[in-house]
Image (cartoon, coloured by chain):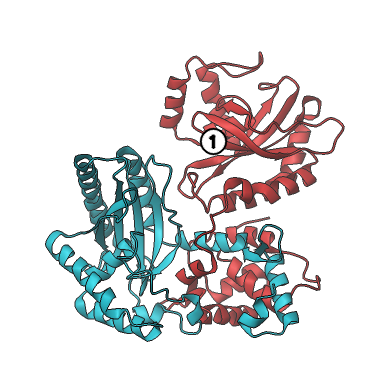
């Protein structure tokens, strides 16, 4: 069970150490450095050793190396470490930061592989979501990824995952600007009260669910992707033909997808939605 | 790949294996499917994680992002880390074409309007200490040129509490920069406001700058009141304690990047 952000990051950086191209000692040092991704607070050698499954001695040597190279800073009062601002020198200031699509790309592949369904990446754009990337699964019948499709925030699973992550004032603003709400199918949510109820359920469940309310032939579930400042980048959705979208499928599929979705959320939350 | 053995003075096979390790772990990636490499995703994630270590960033971002849009100005926040500062926030208003201001970028305190405002606000002894320190790492002798410019900023701050730079190009941004104090009363950061002559006439520009400065007074009050909550772990450290000692290559000083050479913030 992934408990902490650093557990998640360790999952990201874990690769087969038996690969001949990998220098194990270097990898250990890099693993220690990666443990600080997304943490936002100091870490000590004992905690690191526990989280990384290394001996305290190994961790301590890696910390000394990283401190000596100026990549970690040791807080005298506590003996714990944080990332040093020298880390910034490793990046080329002229190269742009990765965007959501670049961050999410490897996860679209992995989630599609484990769930064996189509995965889509939605970007929030004002009162709409836009499908900016996706991976279609290789079934004879699969959901198609319609790149560039623009969907109102109350329709479809990705849009509603985004809508539910906004604060209530923003949602009221959306409803005011888009009154009356339009639908796509007889099952579309077009009443304010029903939409608020759905938003409540999404917030409680932690994901949005859609069976036939955007398209009569498809269904799926989606998670919002928050940014570093409590706003939302967009959402990631997993879906398939409606005949496959029963409760058991949703539960089984989510169990496979969620660890990867949580990793992606942790990384997306390092960046701002307007970058 | 071919450049590394010479730069690092390593046997080619060792350099190759190190680079492969960095590629496999996401610290390096190929540039455009070539044999050249650039920083990988892990580097970007680490830089962003470093930026998120500064507690004052989030309240500043939440307060000033909408203000940048409302007044159509650029606003940046630079936080002091020893003899350097780190850009923690940058918002661009509604304008589309802007000088790229990377979050997490680390610069010496004389490099750009924001860092120079911090430097010019330090006590005189500490400024002298800075120039002596920078002098020992320099590869040329522009020290007098740099100190004159900083001294002009010192005079501006003593007179007006802020620095002001007019862009040498018509399409650039004019900047006003204000120092910010932490709860100990020491200078910990600077906030800079950029206005474009293509967007604002002089009166609108002055109005926008003054409105943002009012908001910055409020934020300054927050920094003083919330004390340790918003302090960074680096705020109370001696600058020499923070600076790396074993890797001078980590910040090769580019002496052409003094504060008057461009209006970077």
The extreme right residue here reads A140
Position above or below: B46 against A218: below
Chain letter, disc 1 residue: A
Quadrant of residue B130 in the image? bottom left
Relative image position of residue B208 (x, y in whole percent): 24, 43
**Residue B27 at least partly seen:** no
Instruction: Kindly identify the residue that appears in the image at 77 percent across and 25 percent down.
Output: A242
Relative image position of residue A183 (x, y in whole percent): 60, 16
Instruction: Kindly identify the residue that appears in the image at 67 percent across and 81 percent down.
Output: B5
Chain in cyan in the render = B
Instruction: Kindly identify the residue that appears in the image at 78 percent across and 35 percent down.
Output: A249
Relative image position of residue B176 (x, y in whole percent): 25, 55
Closest to the observer: A51 or B14? Answer: B14
B74 vs A4, left or right, is left
The picture's colour for chain A is red
| Helix, strand or loop at mark 1 | strand
Q: Quadrant of the N terminus of chain A?
A: bottom right
């Amino acid at each position: 069970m992934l408990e902490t952000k650093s557990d998640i990051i360790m999952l990201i950086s874990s690769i087969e150490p038996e690969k001949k191209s990998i220098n194990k000692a270097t990898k250990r040092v890099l693993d220690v450095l990666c443990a600080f991704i997304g943490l936002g607070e100091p870490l000590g050698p004992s905690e690191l050793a526990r989280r990384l499954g290394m001996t305290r001695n190994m961790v301590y040597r890696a910390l000394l190396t990283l401190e000596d190279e100026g990549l970690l800073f040791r807080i005298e009062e506590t003996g714990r470490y944080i990332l040093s601002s020298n880390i910034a020198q490793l990046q080329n200031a002229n190269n742009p930061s990765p965007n959501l699509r670049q961050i999410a790309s490897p996860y679209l592949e992995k989630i599609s592989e484990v769930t064996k369904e189509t995965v889509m990446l939605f970007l929030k754009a004002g009162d709409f979501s836009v499908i900016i990337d996706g991976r279609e699964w290789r079934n004879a019948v699969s959901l198609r990824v319609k790149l560039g499709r623009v969907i109102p925030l109350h329709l479809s699973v990705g849009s509603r995952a985004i809508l539910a992550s906004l604060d209530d004032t923003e949602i009221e603003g959306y409803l005011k600007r888009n009154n009356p709400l339009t639908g796509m199918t007889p099952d579309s949510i077009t009443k304010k009260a029903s939409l608020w109820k759905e938003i409540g359920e999404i917030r409680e469940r932690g994901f949005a669910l859609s069976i036939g309310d955007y398209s009569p032939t498809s269904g799926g579930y989606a998670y919002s992707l928050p940014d570093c400042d409590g706003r939302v980048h967009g959402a990631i959705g997993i879906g398939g033909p409606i005949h496959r979208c029963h409760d058991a499928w949703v539960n089984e599929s989510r169990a496979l997808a969620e660890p990867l979705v949580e990793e992606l959320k942790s990384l997306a939350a390092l960046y701002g939605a307007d970058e | 790949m071919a450049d590394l053995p010479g730069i690092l003075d390593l046997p080619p096979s060792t350099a190759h294996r190190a680079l492969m390790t960095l590629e496999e772990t996401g610290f390096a990636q190929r540039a455009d499917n070539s044999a050249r490499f650039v920083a990988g995703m892990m580097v970007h994630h680490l830089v962003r994680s470093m930026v998120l270590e500064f507690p004052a960033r989030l309240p500043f971002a939440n307060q000033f992002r909408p203000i940048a849009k409302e007044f159509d100005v650029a606003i940046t926040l630079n936080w002091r880390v020893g003899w350097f500062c780190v850009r923690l926030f940058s918002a661009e208003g509604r304008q589309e074409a802007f000088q790229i201001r990377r979050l997490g970028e680390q610069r010496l305190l004389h490099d750009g309007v924001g860092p120079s405002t911090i430097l010019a606000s330090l006590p005189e002894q500490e400024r002298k200490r800075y120039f002596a320190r920078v002098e020992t790492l320099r590869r040329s002798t522009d020290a007098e040129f740099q100190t004159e410019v900083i001294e002009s900023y010192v005079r501006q701050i003593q007179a007006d509490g802020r620095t002001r730079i007019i862009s040498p190009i018509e399409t650039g941004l004019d900047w006003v920069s204000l120092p910010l104090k932490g709860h100990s009363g020491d200078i910990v950061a600077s906030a800079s406001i950029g206005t474009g002559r293509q967007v604002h006439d002089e009166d609108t520009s002055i109005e926008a700058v003054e409105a943002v400065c009012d908001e910055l007074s409020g934020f300054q009050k927050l920094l003083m009141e919330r004390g340790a909550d918003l302090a960074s772990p680096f705020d109370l450290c001696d600058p020499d304690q923070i600076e790396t000692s074993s890797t001078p290559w980590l910040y090769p000083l580019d002496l052409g990047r003094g504060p008057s050479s461009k209006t970077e913030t």
